Image: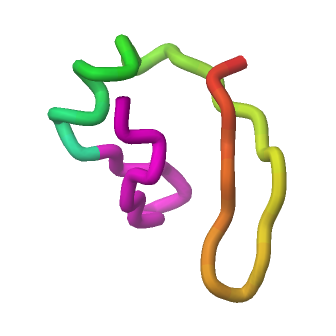
């Protein structure tokens, strides 16, 4: 499973590529928890 997905912030929401949503079984109601962040990106887990 590819856990390194590119996400783009748009209007306060995260846009996750469709193939990543399917791979991780994400729905619109899914909750992500911030694990770490840096100037180059961030890491989150499915809550």
User: What stretch of residues is rendered in magenta?
Assistant: 1-16
Q: Is residue 38 magenta?
A: no
19 or 8, nearer to the observer? 19
**Which quadrant does the C terminus fall into?**
top right
Along the viewing direction, whichever of 11 and 3 lies nearer the viewer:
3
Residue name at image x 76 percent, y 34 percent: 33
Q: Is residue 39 above or below residue 9?
A: below
Quadrant of the rendered structure where residue 25 is? top left
The residue sitting at the front extreme is 1
**Location of residue 7 with respect to 33 vertically, above or below:** below
Query: Residue 34's spot in the image, x, y percent?
Result: 78, 45
Q: Position of residue 39 (x, y in %)?
A: 72, 87
Q: Main secondary structure of the magenta part?
A: loop
Extreme residue toward the bottom, this view: 39
Left or right: 4, with 39 as reference point: left
Identify which residue is drawn at 47% across, 65% down.
9
Q: Is residue 14 within the magenta segment?
A: yes
In the image, residue 13 sits, relative to residue 1, either above or below, namely below
Percent position (x, y) of residue 27?
38, 15
Query: Residue at horizontal 82%, vertical 57%?
Result: 36
């Amino acid at each position: 499973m590819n856990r390194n997905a590119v996400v783009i912030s748009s209007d306060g929401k995260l846009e996750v590529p469709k193939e990543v949503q399917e791979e991780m079984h994400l729905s619109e109601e899914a909750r992500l928890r911030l694990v770490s962040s840096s100037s180059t990106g961030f890491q989150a887990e499915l809550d």
